[in-house]
Image (cartoon, grey):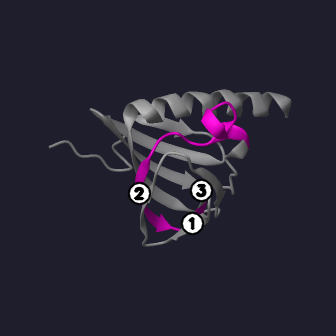
């Protein structure tokens, strides 16, 4: 059975505000995420259907807190919480220093990440 830790991942990167350490296991991707800054994903998700993340995630918060906006409510996850975020959410707040594990279907994550990275690059170029 495959396994991975934050230290043994082979994918991801350091994006300044976020460090993403990841590994793909067939149909699923495991991400270890560390947020150095509060990141509102609304501008990063522009161009996806309804400008919302279309990838479901299962996760566990090691440290800090994160808030996801859903069409009818906001949900805040704290240290020690396991969570499920269905498609159609928007991460709107991540406390600096937050660390969490996220498991996602690889195909959906890849499509979402392509849009996020394109928007991230565009925002960086705008200054």
Q: Is residue 97 above or below residue 47?
A: below
Judging from the image, what secondary structure is the residue with disc 2 in? Answer: strand
Judging from the image, what secondary structure is the residue with disc 1 in? Answer: strand
Identify the residue at the far front of this view: 72
Q: Are marks 3 and 2 in contact (CB under 8 Å)?
A: no
Please indicate, yes or no, whether residue 29 appears anywhere in the rendered image: yes
* Mark found first going from the N terminus, 1 or 2: 2
The picture places residue 26, in percent across and down from the top left corner, at: 27, 32
Quarter of the image with the N terminus in it: top left
For residue 75, which numbered disc appears in the image?
1
Judging from the image, what secondary structure is the residue with disc 3 in? Answer: loop
- Give the number of the mark in front: 3 or 2: 3
Q: Judge whether residue 98 is colored magenta.
A: no
Q: Quadrant of residue 122?
A: top right
Q: Quadrant of residue 30?
A: top left
Q: Judge whether residue 62 is colored magenta.
A: yes
The residue shown at (66%, 39%) is: 51
The residue shown at (67%, 30%) is: 47
* Mark found first going from the N terminus, 3 or 2: 2
Between 13 and 76, which is closer to the camera in this rendering?
76
Name the residue beneath numbered marker 2.
59
Disc 2 crowd rating (10 Å Cα; few below 14, some 14-19, many 20+) is many
Measure how far apart labels 1 and 2 are at the Cα level. Answer: 13 Å
- Give the number of the mark in front: 1 or 2: 1
Name the residue beneath numbered marker 3.
70
């Amino acid at each position: 059975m495959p396994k991975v830790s934050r230290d043994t991942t082979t994918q991801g990167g350091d994006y300044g505000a976020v460090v993403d350490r990841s590994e793909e296991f067939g149909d699923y991707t495991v991400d270890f995420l560390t947020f150095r800054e509060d990141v509102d994903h609304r501008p990063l998700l522009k161009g996806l259907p309804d400008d919302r993340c279309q990838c479901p995630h299962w996760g566990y918060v090691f440290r800090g807190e994160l808030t996801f906006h859903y069409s009818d409510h906001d949900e805040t996850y704290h240290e020690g919480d396991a969570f499920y975020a269905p498609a159609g959410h928007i991460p709107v707040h991540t406390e600096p220093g937050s660390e969490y594990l996220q498991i996602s279907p690889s195909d959906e994550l890849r499509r979402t990440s392509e849009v996020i990275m394109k928007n991230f690059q565009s925002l960086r170029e705008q200054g």
